[in-house]
């Protein structure tokens, strides 16, 4: 089982995250931000990753530290759980419809972080969640996982649907990238290694 437990303690947040990439999509998350918990549940459920997250953050300031630091820890957990990357697909992609929204996501677990995200939001908040934090969350995940991540909003009007589609597309792309392929021998790179 490819698992990871990461703890992070700062003056702004206290986080404990447990990840099992070979799980069943069982999720228990408490961040203090209802909409964010809802999105993290989609990520775990649709990537078939068991995910348990407990976060205490300085929400009296705003949601920034809680969301970004959760992304940092999730990225670290993905990197640790994936391990040496032998036998995995490495690449993953998904095109997900969410009502009127259509989202594309592509991932490369190359070890070299890069992030390109389209965030055409028309409101500042969904619930108590700042929409500008979507990009910050995914950037934190990608940088700490060593992931090349592209998310493109092909169409969409409802901000809830767009964000939910982004999380579901990310989850399905991640599932594809970390899945073992019996035809792949060793590390899926012509270099014989992937950057760490």
Image (cartoon, rainbow, N blue to C red):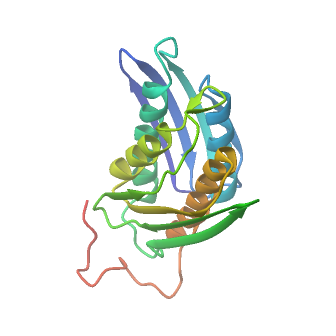
User: Which one is in front, 79 or 127?
Assistant: 127
- Tell me residue 10's x, y (percent): 36, 20
Is residue 27 toward the left or the right of residue 113 in the image? right
Screen quadrant of the N terminus: bottom right
Q: Tell me which residue sits at (48%, 76%) in the image.
A: 89
Is residue 64 toward the left or the right of residue 167 in the image? left
- Tell me residue 163's x, y (percent): 61, 48
- Which residue in the rendered view is the most extreme toward the right? 99
Q: Tell me which residue sits at (41%, 84%) in the image.
A: 185
Screen quadrant of the C terminus: bottom left
Q: Tell me which residue sits at (35%, 47%) in the image.
A: 144
Q: Tell me which residue sits at (58%, 30%) in the image.
A: 129
Is residue 146 toward the left or the right of residue 54 in the image? left
| Residue 170 lies in quadrant | bottom right
- Which residue in the rendered view is the most extreme toward the top? 60
User: Which one is in front, 39 or 7?
Assistant: 39
- Which residue in the rendered view is the most extreme toward the bottom? 183
Residue 119's place in the image compared with 190, above or below, is above
- Tell me residue 62's x, y (percent): 48, 19
Residue 2's place in the image compared with 107, above or below, is above
- Tell me residue 59's x, y (percent): 52, 16
Count of numbered badges drawn on the protein: 0
Residue 72's place in the image compared with 100, above or below, is above
| Residue 112 lies in quadrant | bottom left
């Amino acid at each position: 089982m490819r698992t990871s437990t990461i703890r992070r303690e700062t003056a702004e947040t206290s986080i404990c995250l447990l990840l099992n990439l070979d799980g069943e999509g069982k999720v228990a998350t408490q961040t203090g931000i209802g909409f964010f918990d809802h999105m993290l549940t989609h990520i775990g459920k649709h990537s078939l990753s068991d995910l348990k997250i407990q976060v205490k953050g300085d929400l009296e300031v705003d949601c920034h530290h809680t969301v970004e630091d959760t992304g940092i820890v999730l990225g670290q957990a993905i990197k640790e759980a994936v391990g040496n990357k032998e036998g995995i697909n490495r690449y993953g992609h998904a095109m997900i419809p969410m009502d009127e929204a259509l989202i594309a996501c592509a991932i490369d677990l190359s070890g070299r972080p890069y992030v390109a995200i389209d965030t055409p939001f028309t409101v500042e908040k969904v619930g108590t969640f700042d929409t500008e934090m979507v990009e910050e969350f995914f950037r934190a995940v990608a940088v700490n996982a060593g992931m090349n991540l592209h998310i493109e909003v092909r169409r969409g009007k409802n901000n809830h649907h767009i964000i939910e589609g982004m999380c579901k597309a990310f989850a399905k792309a991640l599932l594809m990238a970390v899945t073992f392929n019996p035809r792949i021998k060793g590390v899926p790179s012509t270099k014989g290694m992937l950057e760490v």
